[in-house]
Amino acid sequence: MPEARPEAQNFAQNGTCNLAKNAMNNEPVKGANSGKLAKKEADCDAKNIFSYRKYWAQRFGIAPFLPMSREEMDLLGWDSCDVIIVTGDAYVDHPSFGMAIMGRLLEAQGFRVGIIAQPEWSDSEAFKALGKPNLYYGVTGGNMDSMINRYTADRRIRHNDSYTPNDEGGKRPDRSVIVYSQRCREAYKDVPIVIGGIEASLRRTAHYDYWSDKVRRSVLIDSKADILLYGNAERAIVDLTHRVAAGEAPKDIDDIRGTVVARKEIPEGWTVADMTDIDDDNDLHHIPDRAEARKKLRDADKNKTAVRLPSYEEVIADKALYAQASRVVHLESNAGNARVMVQKHGDRDIWINQPPIPLTTPEMDGVFDLTYARAPHPIYGDAKLAAWDMIRFSVNIMRGCFGGCSFCSITEHEGRVIQSRSEESILKEIEDIRDKVDGFTGQITDMGGPTANMYRMACKDDKIQKVCRRLSCVYPDVCKNLDTSHESLIQLYRKARDIKGVKKISIQSGLRYDIAVKSPTYIKELVTHHVGGYLKIAPEHTEERALSKMMKPGIGTYERFKSMFDAAAKKAGKELYLIPYFIAAHPGCEDEDMMNLAVWLKQNGFRADQVQNFIPSPMALSTAMYHSERNPLRPIRRHSGEVVHTAKGMKQRRLHKAFLRYHDPENWPILRDALRNLGRADLIGPGKKHLVPAHQPIGTGDNKPGARGFAKKKDGNSSGKAFFTTHAGQGRRRAHDRASVANGAGASEGPARGATAHGKAKSAGKPARRKPSGQRRRTRT
């Protein structure tokens, strides 16, 4: 560990409480304790991230872009970097990209930050490009988990990467955090390594890894890093960096919320409770007096109580323990009442500190108002960056999601508490886009976040929120304590539309329709001004057996929203469509459920254009279901608990995917077989009431050259005529072309879904007649 500069000694943060008032509303910043574990104080306010005394290197000022080369450092007058961030994404200096947020935030604290983006990882030379960092390397895989970024649901390699110039694939290694950390260690053995970002966040405990089909250790252990930051880590990285600058070693800093460290001993004075003590009705361990054990746990000091999860070795051997551990990790996710968790890996424990305290509105404003260049680094020249093109004219207005969908990673990374920016900050960013971003034509392409319509929503009672352990605020029903008012969002929309030079504001973020139906005024505002052609929405499925495992509302809620949406569109004199998304092969979904979904799709005139199966992302509850075939939404019972049937084999997963594309002739052979096996041969035939026809067009499915059972023409030659089908708004399209699914942007790595186009269903098996070119209409789906 390098010795701290003398100037930095006065900047150490000793964990004292910050009692400064919230500058915006004159209320104390709600938050958590800081300081050593033995000195935690339950009622201590979180320290404002912009209240730290700046590091001495602030004298160098603000960099146009954070430097990526020694030449840039020389132009800035730097002899070294204090922190070097290594990332799997191309460097885009914009608040939608993690490396930019962390880099600019540390710059605002006075530190010199360099960026090494997508380095060549075969050796350590690229990791020495900016020299030796004074404080630490910060390592992140990027805005997506590197395995989800690289592989499809069928474990096939993707050949594109939206976060790489010109969409080029293969520019980051598998398990990037581990590989980058190893190379950093090889470059400079004595430099501490801090890992963070979504890949590290979702792999902070022992976790099931879909691509290797096994439970892997915490990425902290595998990467040999000094400390892991999880979630939105602004508080953690500011506190950590100031303390490292003052001379502390990252591996010895064990008291910061939102961090994971490795240690060999439990500190004196701490109570360690087995995880089975805190959950009713599980029967995983024999506890003579469970009620007494729970009472002892309740009476213990929450700030000096740790919950012991089963060890890495135990969750490998016992899937029931894995499922219960996953359940407990999610129950301990509320920053207001979560306890420290401990999990043994060999002879060491990983010490998972309590979740970070959400940022206040002034802090959120401060983060988004930092001096971003709002452009990719000039090193990329004219290269195209798909992820940048998608968000360059959009505005992020909030963070977090209280939906709790079991397949989604947003809640696990960003938390359930909504962190909203102020109107002033959002409107200022729109003006900055208008004035500073090249190519702006007057359209803001999105104004949302993880969801479109949770802005400023919160629990009505702060005391209730602090003790709540619900996994979702909206499932199975919207909580009566949740304030679902859309008034703040409606006012924000109206003020944004009034900005000079803004012609159109579209809403592209996914809409949470089960809370939207509570505000007819919002739906009217949305339809009248912010939807052009179509709106994305995610019912995910139609069948309760599947929806109950996803923690999604029943299809009746979707139909209620659709009725309100259609009525508002008609009143506004607009022709609009909903584009629903569905998940194939989700845990709990059986063949019959997918068949019923396909029938519903056909009855309602939907044809899925882009389809992919559920991907078990690390740490998600759905992933625990997939791996263990148990339901972690309830206490796990070894012998009498619910069994979750899961499509695991490729044959069944492809069948579920085929049901979503029931109209594609390539899928008709396997669908016919499945329908017969399900006793639903009545769905095979030529009529509108049938799902698939009995005949197979020449050149498709089993009736094409090289296929088993291929039928030839009378002259012995195979047909070279391609079969076409029509998707609403898409013109003519080859039915047997497989539609690729673009990589998702942002921090969310939820499941891949089927996006559908809404239109009148054609009779199955009949080629669509091509309209004259002047009549064809193309829309995005």
Image (cartoon, helix red, strand yellow):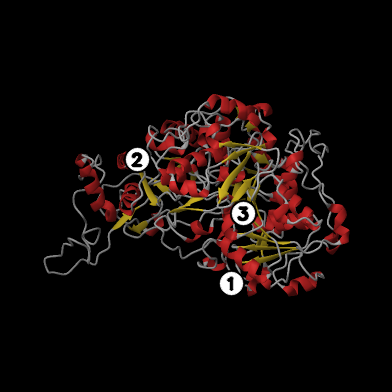
Mark 2, secondary structure of its residue:
helix
- Label 2 amino acid? Leu
Determine whether, in the image, residue 502 is placed left or right of residue 41: left
Residue type (three-letter) at the residue carrying disc 1? Glu
Figure quadrant of residue 602: top left
Residue sitting at x 50%, y 58%: 147
First in sequence: mark 3 vs mark 1? 1
Observer-nearest of 62 and 413: 413
Q: Give the crowd class for mark 3: few <14, some 14-19, many >=20 residues within 10 Å.
A: many
* Front one among 120 and 373: 120
Q: According to the image, label 3 marks what residue?
A: 197
Q: How far apart are marks 3 and 1 (CA)?
A: 20 Å
Q: Report whether residue 576 is seen.
A: no
Residue matched to label 1? 120
The crowding category of the residue bearing disc 2, from other C-alpha atoms within 10 Å (few below 14, some 14 to 19, many at least 20), is many
Residue 597's disc number: 2
Which residue ends up furthest to the front in the rendered image? 288
Residue 542 drawn at (x, y percent): 38, 37
Residue at image position (77%, 58%) is: 107
Quarter occupied by residue 457: top right
Precedes in sequence: disc 1 or disc 2: 1
Quadrant where the N terminus is found in the figure: bottom right
